[in-house]
Image (cartoon, rainbow, N blue to C red):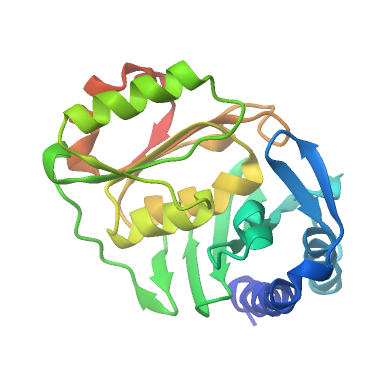
Amino acid sequence: MSDTALASAAIREAGQLARAFFERRHELLIDQKGPQDYVSAADREVESCLISRLSQLFPDDGFVGEESGQRHGAREWIIDPIDGTTNFLRGIPVFAITLALVEADVTQLGLIYDPMRDVLYEATAGGGARCNGEPIQPLWRSALSQSLIGLCHSSRLHPEQLTARISSVLRSGAILRQPGSAALMLCDLAMGRIDGLYDADLKAWDSVAGLLIAREAGAIASNFLAKESWRTAPQPTLAVAPGLYPELSALWPEIRDIPCLP
């Protein structure tokens, strides 16, 4: 079996575990890592499940996990066990498991599984993007005045910065979306459900898989792995329809400095 097939089976298994935890979430012990930044036993158990399975399949590979830290290898799996933990804990069924395979600072494989809808998004470098096995062929809008723009944010973003971004994009005629899972927003971008996405401060496990999926669907997407510190340091994450990039970068000049890949 291919790496994609093996990883797909592993992420689906982890997703079903996450769904089981979601259905009894009121029993979970919850810790707070920072302002509006939560972790529960579900996050830790789902990540442990994925690492255990991948270690059996690929014993020489390393890991970068949100909850378990790092184990270096020539190939490394980037894991977010539950992207959208706040949604998960509040009973909002919008969360996902993310998994990416990185080799020589290049993302080779990206998978995002939505266990509540049983939808698997995947992409391979140079091999296109798929949703439940079917090729993704997005139809994006070409003007901000017709667009939906995803704007992720966290407590780390200064309120005045967020207000300025919101005001400027609304004045352009666009409408904003913020469902609470950066990974699923990147999948929405890849599918053509939204036309652009920006977050100034995401971690690798939030971004790397979804950026490959968006890029292989045809979007302009930021190169999260361009900096040597990508495993630990938060970075801007951008994905946008190619025809919309000039208008969006004029509106938000800071995105011009983000290294991107077509």
Residue 65 shows in the view: no
Residue at 36% across, 78% down: 134
Judge left or right: residue 14 versus residue 223.
Answer: right
Residue 26 image point, x, y percent? 77, 68
What residue do we see at 49% from left, 62% from top? 124
Residue 205: x and y, percent?
A: 65, 47
Examine the rendering and report whether any part of residue 121 can be seen.
yes
- Left or right of residue 189: residue 202: right
Q: Where is residue 20 in the image (x, y as percent from the top left)?
A: 73, 79
Residue 80 or 60: which is nearer the viewer? 80
Q: Which quadrant of the rendered structure holds the C terminus?
A: top left
Residue at x 53% of width, y 63% of height:
94
In-front residue for pair 215/80: 80
| Vertical comparison of 252 with 55: above or below | above
Residue 175: image quadrant is top left
Q: Quick one: 56 or 104, which is closer to the camera?
A: 56
Q: Which residue is drawn at 52% across and 80% down?
A: 118
- Say which quadrant the N terminus sits in: bottom right
User: Which image quarter: residue 44?
Assistant: bottom right
Snapshot quadrant of residue 83? bottom right
Q: Count of labels shown?
A: 0
Horizontal placement of 130 versus 226: left or right?
Answer: left
Residue 147: image x %, image y %?
19, 45
